[in-house]
Image (cartoon, rainbow, N blue to C red):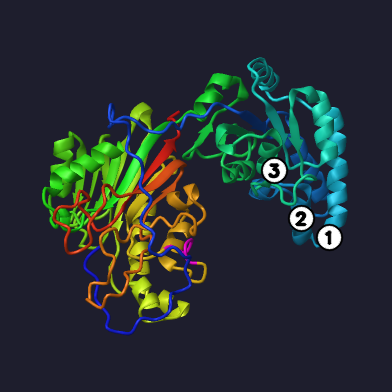
Amino acid sequence: MAPRASTSRPTSPDPPHPPLQSEPPTRIPPPRKENPVTHRPTARLPLQAVLFDMDGTLVDTERLWWEAVEQVADGFGHALTGVDQPQVLGRPVEYTAAWLAGVTGASAGVIAAELHQQFADRVRTGIVPRPGARELLDALAREGVPTALVTASPRAVADTVLEALGAERFAVSVTADDTERTKPAPDPYLAACRALGVDPAACVAVEDTQTGVTSAESAGCAVLAVPSLAPIAPAAGRTVLGSLEEVSPARLRAMVAPGELRVMSWNLWYGGTKVDGYREKQLKVITETGADVVGLQETYGDSARELAEALGWYHHRAGDNLGIISRYPITARLGDPDVGFYGGTGVRIGLDGGRRVDVWSAHLDCAPYGPYEARFDGLPAAELIAHESGRLDRMREILRGIAASADASVPVVLVGDFNAPSHLDWPEVAWPVTKAAEEAGLRDSYREAHPDPVRDPGHTWSPVHTEHEDGSGRQEPQDRIDFVLHRGLAVVDSRTLVSGTPRAWPDVADNDWPSDHAAVVTVFAVPRGD
């Protein structure tokens, strides 16, 4: 963060913000000294369960459902076409009935009853297991992997299918009658995981429609998509295959045994120059964290290159303030290479096994600073939010850059010093910068790992600024303004990081910690390439 403008206004009451304002950042324990670079917490989870959709996945009822809807729709004067697929495939009866009612003007209740009857008649006489379905279920049983049936069909239909497939093959079954919301909401998969006593992140959901895929991914499961009638695009954390005949327990197990990526966000504070021996201290910090990728702010020139060369890593520099260093090869540079002091820059990194990750580093404007305006000036929430317009515009520009360079199959990480608090931390201020990132699909890794902002505030500003710089003696508001956000990854752990016991400004020259920010270090599980 650049030096912040002082204010001479009187101190006002604390803003609406969790207590523990002056608590120092949580310190991440260093790796064991005997192997400081490679020691990391494990992210490898055993395959705890496989959760199967029913219609179109295990049995060829998607065709039967389409035929049933087609006949009912035709009876009410509507001819189905491929355009209608999103309203039919993977949807519960009530959803499709309501949609048809809107199209035809008929009663949704009458249509739903007709759909139930037509589909049930077809299921009783026309169930055909999908190729490889029984064989995969038997292979999982031999290896002791529990399975569940998770369907948007009603219980009566599911029980008919279970009888045909062998109900003993499934430890749990969840139908549309068993949860308040069904697919595409995550509720059915979460209910199945609760019933089995398993972690969704250690489960593979097998689906054939985008509606089901959305449900399973929202629940946190890895997804194997085997499309039936409509195509499903590949994406981060998702494997798409043509048939269950291509699937084995080993392949499913590999989907929840991902690689690891440790990402660090660090504002170097004038490149580190406020502290003696800063470059050696920076290298020591990076080495001891075991970081794989570091998004840097306030590089003040060549810090990214010098750090990367000393580590034997790859680097990217954008302007005089932003950089990214990586132990893995940088395969593409993203965004404007001539970005100004504030802005964002990105790279695509090639990991082992053909996996790729986009990593962006951002630095947003330092003034006006919301916690000062809240603490010292007593501004209400609406004014605090209004004053974020400049940072919000810059964040939206960065998010547009991320979207423009995105590949749906490549996870994204956005790190940086946002110079703004999080809406997840302040219950009465909906800080718009982090909300904009969330609305773009980016999740806050620290809050995923530590959801309670009172118990785990995660402050990153500031380990050395304890009193405000204007000499008034007022306590500097402590807050979380540095972030590691992501899309398409699973969080294993996230911590803020400060080494040693830094002395307060201005007596910082001998500090072991060469910054005025705490760093953020997140360990991600990265889906395997397929």
For residue 11, which numbered disc appears in the image? none
Distance between the Cα atoms at labels 3 and 1?
A: 30 Å
Distance between the Cα atoms at labels 2 and 3?
A: 24 Å
Q: For mark 1, does the 10 Å Cα neighbourhood hold few (<14), some (14 to 19), or many (20 or more) residues?
A: some
For residue 100, which numbered disc appears in the image? 2
At x 36% / y 57%, what residue is drawn? 24
Q: For mark 3, does the 10 Å Cα neighbourhood hold few (<14), some (14 to 19), or many (20 or more) residues?
A: many
Q: Which range is magenta?
A: 422-426
Q: Is residue 335 left or right of residue 524?
A: left
At x 67% / y 32%, what residue is drawn? 52
Q: Are marks 2 and 1 in contact (CB under 8 Å)?
A: yes
Earlier sequence position, callout 2 versus callout 3: 2
Q: Position of residue 294 (x, y in %)?
A: 28, 45
At x 36% / y 61%, what residue is drawn? 481
Name the amino acid, label 3: Pro
Residue 342 vertical position relative to residue 527 in the rendered view, above or below: below
Q: Nearer the viewer, residue 135 or 174?
A: 174
What residue would you read off at disc 1? Answer: 106
Distance between the Cα atoms at labels 2 and 1?
A: 8 Å
Q: Is residue 361 left or right of residue 384?
A: left
Residue 248 can be seen, yes or no: no
What residue would you read off at disc 3? Answer: 188
Q: Secondary structure at mark 3?
A: helix
Q: Nearer the viewer, residue 344 or 422?
A: 422
Q: Position of residue 414 (x, y in %)?
A: 36, 51
Q: Position of residue 355 (x, y in %)?
A: 38, 33
Earlier sequence position, callout 3 versus callout 1: 1
Earlier sequence position, callout 2 versus callout 1: 2
Name the amino acid, label 1: Ala
